[in-house]
Image (cartoon, rainbow, N blue to C red):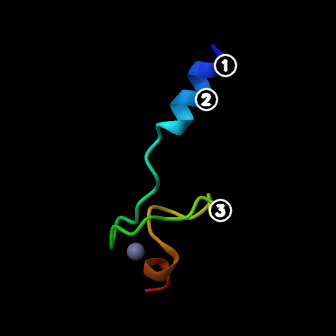
Amino acid sequence: MVQNIIEFFKNLPPKKCAECGKQIEEQHECYETKCPQCNKL
Ligand SMILES: [Zn+2]
């Protein structure tokens, strides 16, 4: 069961910015669906 959960998170696609499509680093979980650059705009 635990292995299934691990596989689930492994298969999660990386966050992508809704504006430019750039991959968002996981260290900023509180960010919305936009990368820091687009959030500043
Ligand atoms: Zn962006």
Q: Are marks 3 and 2 in contact (CB under 8 Å)?
A: no
Q: Are marks 1 and 2 in contact (CB under 8 Å)?
A: yes
Question: In terms of image quadrants, where is residue 20?
Answer: bottom left
Mark 1 to mark 3 CA distance (whole Å) = 24 Å
Mark 3 to mark 2 CA distance (whole Å) = 19 Å
- What amino acid is found at the position of numbered circle 1 in the picture? Val
Mark 1 to mark 2 CA distance (whole Å) = 6 Å
Give the residue at x 52% y 30%: 8
Q: Secondary structure at mark 3?
A: loop
Give the residue at x 47% y 37%: 11
Residue 7, given in percent of the width and then of the height, sits at 54, 28
Question: In the shown orientation, is residue 20 left or right of residue 11?
Answer: left
Residue 12, given in percent of the width and then of the height, sits at 47, 41
- Could you tell me which quadrant the N terminus lies in? top right
Task: Report which residue position mark 1 lands on.
Answer: 2
- Could you tell me which quadrant the C terminus lies in? bottom left
Give the residue at x 44% y 68%: 34
